[in-house]
Each structure stands twice: as C-alpha cells, then as structure tokens.
Amino acid sequence: MTAQDTYFDTLETRDPAEREAQRLQALAQQVAHAADNAPFYTALLADVDPRAIEDYAAFAALPVTRKSELKEHQAAQPPFGGLAAVTPGAMARIFVSPGPIYDPEGDRVDYWRLGRAMHAAGFRRGELVHNAFSYHFTPAASMAEGGARAIGCAVIPAGVGQTELQVEAIAGLRPHGYVGTPSFLKIILEKGDELGADLSSLTKALVSAEPYPPSLRSFFAERGIAGVQCYATADLGLIAYESPGQEGLIVDEGVYVEIVRPGTGEPVPEGEVGEVVVTNLCPEYPLLRFATGDLSAVLPGTSPCGRSNRRIKGWMGRADQTTKVRGMFVHPSQVAAVLARHPELGRGRLVVDRADDRDSMTLHAELKGAAPDGLADAVAESLRDVCKLRGEVDLVAEGSLANDGKVIDDIRTFE
C-alpha cells in the first residue's frame, strides 16, 4: 500500500516543527481575517494586533468565545451572532441545532472536513457509504456526505429510523461502509439477524455523536466490521479522528486544539484533563478559541499509524459544571477566580453537598508548597467575596486531586 493510499494528504505526516510554524502563521492570519470581517470579533479584538501573535503564548492570551453563549449572541445579532464573515446568502445551507442555534455550512467541497476521518477509517474512492446520520435540521448527515463525496464515494442517504428499511437497503445495495451512531449500527445488525438478512457487505464504519465503548467495538469486530470514531461538532466540523492505530484521536489539520482549565482560557499541562478549546481555519465562520464545553486531555507522543499531529483522549465529559447553591449559581470560572487570587494554590475542586436540608460547599485546593499562616482563612474570604456564599476550605497536597477536569463536584442527593 502506498503512502497515497494510507494517508488523506501530505499534511498528516508533516514534521511537527513544520506544522507548528505553519499553523501559528495561519492562526495569526485567521485572527486578522475575523477582526476585519466578523462584527463580533471586530469588537472583541479591537485592542489586538494580529501581527503581535508571534507564539502560542500570545495566542492563548486572546479571549475565549463560549459555545454556551452562542444562543445569546445569535439572538442579539441574528442569525449568526456576528461571528460569520460572510452573509447568510453566501452559505450553502443553514442548520438548526437544539437551542435553537443556527449553524452555517459554506459552499465548498467537504466544508466540515470529514473526508480526512473517513479516509482514516478505510473508505476509498468508488465505494458505497450507508449514511445513517440525521438529515433533519442538524448537520451531521451533511458532514458525512460531504466527506464521502470528497473521497469519491457514493452515498445512501438513509438517515435515522425505519430499521427494517435500513436493513433492506443494505442487503440490496451492498454498501461497503456505514457512518452514523454506533448504537444505531448495532440496532441495524441485530434487526438483520432477526430478519435473516445478509449485511456482510459492511466491513468498515465511522461512528460519532455518542460514546463508543469497547463492548460495541468488539461487537462490530466479531462481525467483520472495523469501526473507528471521530469527534466533531455542529459549529466546528471535524475536531479529531481515530485511525487504525486506535490510540487516541488525532487532531484534524484544519483546527488548532487547546486544553484549558475549565472556566478559564489558561492551557493546562500535557496529560491534564481540561476543556477543549478549538480555533478553526474556516474563512466563512472563523471561530477563535471556541470553548466547546467538552473535556479531554492531550496524549503524549504521536500515533503509531504515522500521522504526526497531536492526539487527544477523546470525549471525557462536560466542562460546564455550573450548579446552584442556596439559590445562587456557582460557575467554574468563579472557582478559577478564587484560585487565581492565591499564587500558593494550584488546582482546585469545589464539592457541594447537603446535610440537614442545608447546602454546604468545600473548596479543596492543592498547595504548590508550604502553606503560609492564615492561607485557609484568606481563601475562604475570597470564596465568599467571589461566590457571595460561605464555604469551607481544605488545603491538600499537590497532585492529590483527581485528574478528571472536574472543578465543581455536586454530590447532593434530594430524596
């Protein structure tokens, strides 16, 4: 098998130093493009000189745009909140995600960049793809269809539901591969067993949009289906994808991924769990430091498959851990603000509990060294000042808190 057969393009196997230099230049250009053409970023970056973005530390100083705030931005400045750099009429499609949030699709081939993930999953030109993502309002099916067409595959636009018809179509048309959720593929295969249908033409699958546990991976493998996963969102398209190496998810070449401490824009060390923040290189919808609300961590090294970009562990939960204590909302950003007031502290976790029908909260904070006298009281005062609520403070040894990205742990039970 040639390198051309193995890899989608030469970008995947670039020397990492070359990639870093080219990507930093592209990021600075994207900042300038967004500031010049997207009204939201024109205002947000009014004091930013793109020419001053000479390293990743300077880029990390830019403000974060949060997915959780998109609905508010779009309501204030419809339809895209001022984040788009072209008019709605210049788009190919506009999707409606729950919220509602309006997601634009630009008018070019493989806008969402799923072709790279499908190629890594083994799809090749001339094959037939059974696309079981939803075609109704949301962009998942369009993402997959665009990727398939970029490779040169024909598509069965199956969508979701009508399981018996799905089985009939696969048995009759003999597609080579499946794209959709892993749980629905399992349903289709089990229905095929029930109906005595031959679905053996399926030998590969690219799955997404929900967890992909080892049990499902094994279930497909036993039926001769090599199933890998990808991580994509309706705002950004492809973020990361799995290769046959199956060691983490490789970051897509069209985005820059940071892992930051939840509630902040501060990058965390390699291996530490934090919030996934993504910047795309999309000219139509330039999202800069876009906080997805998802948790993940960077894996050390590179994939054994030869692709040289960074890898992440995949989806590890949600970073938006906002909760309500004694009638007041408490946000991860507030916990981060408390910790930032005290340079003696590292990571922290606010545990919210309930006893005798009364809420309580305790901030467990890691010490970077010895604790000066009065530090716990000072941190408790900061907690009260920032959150407007009283809480206890427990100073713990560095590295003793779980590395799971959790900043607020609400363990209350209401019976």
Image (cartoon, helix red, strand yellow):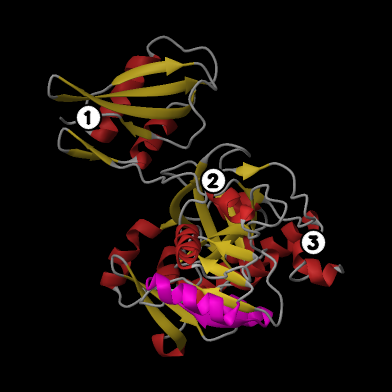
Q: Is residue 110 visible?
A: no
* Residue 190 percent coordinates (x, y): 47, 60
Q: Which residue is mark 2?
A: 215
Image depth: mark 2 or mark 3 in front: 2
Magenta stretch: give its range.
146-174
Kindly give the residue lying farthest to the top in the view shown.
Answer: 373
Q: Return the disc, 1 or 2, that comes first in the chain's sequence.
A: 2
Q: Residues within 10 Å of mark 2 (few under 14, many from 20)?
A: few
Q: Which residue is mark 1?
A: 413
Between the C-alphas of marks 1 and 2, the distance is: 31 Å
Q: Return the disc, 2 or 3, that comes first in the chain's sequence.
A: 3
* Residue 394 percent coordinates (x, y): 37, 17
Q: Nearer the viewer, residue 10 or 228?
A: 228
Q: Nearer the viewer, residue 39 or 223?
A: 223
Q: Is residue 207 above or below residue 271?
A: below
Between the C-alphas of marks 1 and 3, the distance is: 50 Å
Q: Which residue is mark 3?
A: 13
Q: Quadrant of residue 334?
A: top left
Q: Is residue 265 above or below residue 178?
A: above
